[in-house]
Image (cartoon, grey):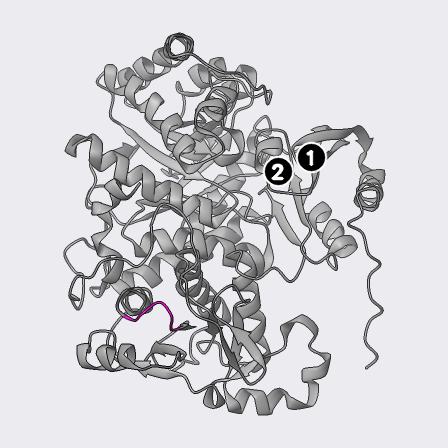
Amino acid sequence: MHHLAGWFTGSVRPAARRRTREVLVGGVGIGGDHPVRVQSMITSDTRDTAACVAEVLALADAGCDIVRVTAQTKSVAANLEHIISGVRSAGCLVPLVADIHFKPDAAMEAVKWVEKVRVNPGNYADKKKFEIREYSDAQYAEELNRIRETFAPLVVRCRELGRAMRIGTNHGSLSDRIMNRYGDTPLGMVESALEFARIAREHDYHQFVFSMKSSNPKVMIQAYRLLVARLDQEGPDWNYPIHLGVTEAGDGEDGRIKSAIGIGSLLADGIGDTIRVSLTEDSIHEIPVARVLVDICRADAGDGGGSRSGVAAAVASSTPSFDPFSYERRRSSPLEITGHRLGAENTVRVFTTQDRWNALAHKIASMGDYQPEVILEKSGVVGIDPRDEAAVAALNARGETCLVTVTDDIGMNVIPAFRMLAAKVEARHPILLKDTLDAPREERDFQHHLLAAARNLGSLLCDGIGDAVLVRGETAPGQSLRLAYNVLQAAGARIFKTDYVACPSCGRTLFNLQTTTRRIREATGHLKGVRIAVMGCIVNGPGEMADADFGYVGGAPGKINLYVGKTAVKFNLPEDEAVGRLIDLIREHGKWIDAPEPAAL
């Protein structure tokens, strides 16, 4: 993919936001000169008008710009007429989006009432049965013609009614046709979306945005970068806006960190015109997280407004040290510091400062997997300004390998500073990443520190840069260490606990996701390295669980299906038995260990 990398010249400087055309969703503009728009999705049953109206109004009051509602069938979609009537009667003008999976007739009904529809190319007119089949070019073209016949009527109707559309690919629901030709890859995600976009353009319809969502931040970042590169390659009139989201991010701190890595990294690259943070929590809690992520990136732009012309502190161009479209860890040499090996293929280490170590000294032995490993002041780390050619040359002239970092207070943003360091310093020197290059600011709350650290460190780790991390923005010693480890887990750099893929609730959900996810965490949270998917319905279930060891999926109201990988093995289990049966399944496959006894206080 290196022939596409020309667009990524901003990788070592603060990125100007990618310029796009404007797409209007009712009275709300996406792209163009508009700010990044924040979206969410209600969780109420679409047939319950009063509950849906109340939730839409609450989200609008919380600062949500656009609200999505599921529309599973044509009859369900018909109730959107009453929902939007109730919202407008309350004086609320927030645009509504119908979320469509599997049912083209539901989309044709929904578009009568709402300002935008979201379609998933993987299941709108395609199928997913995990069939293995070799498609000839003629057979592939025949399938595309069938898709054109199914999708084109919606395109024509959207153009007639002035409706917008999101062509939203999900990593977990790529069709068998795409999977057989391109595999379960970012390239497959992009090609799936471009097929639908070409059909839209055949009808001179351009009021659409793209998304490339995945529960894996690395996959998501690569897919969006590849999409933008392909759009640039197609031509200047393919400048469609981009919707960002990490699907099935989960809840709590982990869900926020995973979202910050995926969404925040791309915003920092200048990609993204509207975002949704998908948490397995009440949707109103998504809005402040999204707002902070947008604010962090606006601040980095240097003008407080996130405009395309206000990029601060131009940095001399330098070739990126990594492939933006595929992950490979930077090939540093091994180094041992105070008994801990880092660099090369060694695990990414967690640093702390001497004063924080001292504050925790009395309880380090009881901190389990969140212990500090190396003290900054005893590490021998060398700090340099990567723009200082003499300092870079002196470091590279050294015979011995040494740990290197970016020095503080040099007026650069974290991500471009460390990318420049990685590009200019010889790869043999391991790199210590820092979440901030400024003095910690205690007036900011924990969520701000969490999101900023996750974005800065996670972005670089997903680029393959970094052999150790130091969190300084959060000043509480224990919290800073927990944050460092959780960022490493979410970025896939160091797996030290159970990993969960948990979707946000919506009107399709067949059980209480928040309660169930909590119960599963309580029962399985000690299974280090095991990945468990918790899905409210089948929309993304099997596909998004391809990387998971086990899956817990709503099959019918009150009934649960259990999966091993992407294969369903237990069907229609009563919900009150399903967690216990999941534990039995984990035992059967040799992944279960008993939880350790709590440490005595």
Asked if residue 105 lies left or right of residue 557, the reply is left
Please tell me which residue lies in front, 108 or 402. Answer: 402
From the image, state whether disc 1 or disc 2 is nearer to you.
2
Question: What is the three-letter code of the residue carrying label 2?
Answer: Met
Q: Which span of residues is magenta-colored? A: 425-429
What residue sits right under mark 2 in the picture?
Answer: 545
The disc label shown at residue 601, or none = none
Q: Residue at x 31, y 57 (%)?
A: 268
Q: Return the disc, 1 or 2, that comes first in the chain's sequence.
A: 2
Asked if residue 187 lies left or right of residue 550, the reply is left
Q: Dot 2 surroundings within 10 Å: few (below 14), some, or many (20 or more)? A: many
Residue 383 in the magenta stretch? The answer is no
Residue 312 vertical placement versus 4 (above, below): below
Q: Are marks 1 and 2 in contact (CB under 8 Å)?
A: yes
Question: What is the three-letter code of the residue carrying label 1?
Answer: Val
Q: Residue at x 80, y 47 (%)?
A: 590
Asked if residue 198 lies left or right of residue 85, the reply is left
**What percent of the width, then of the height, locates residue 487?**
52, 63
- The answer to which image quadrant residue 222 occupies is top left
Magenta span main SS: loop
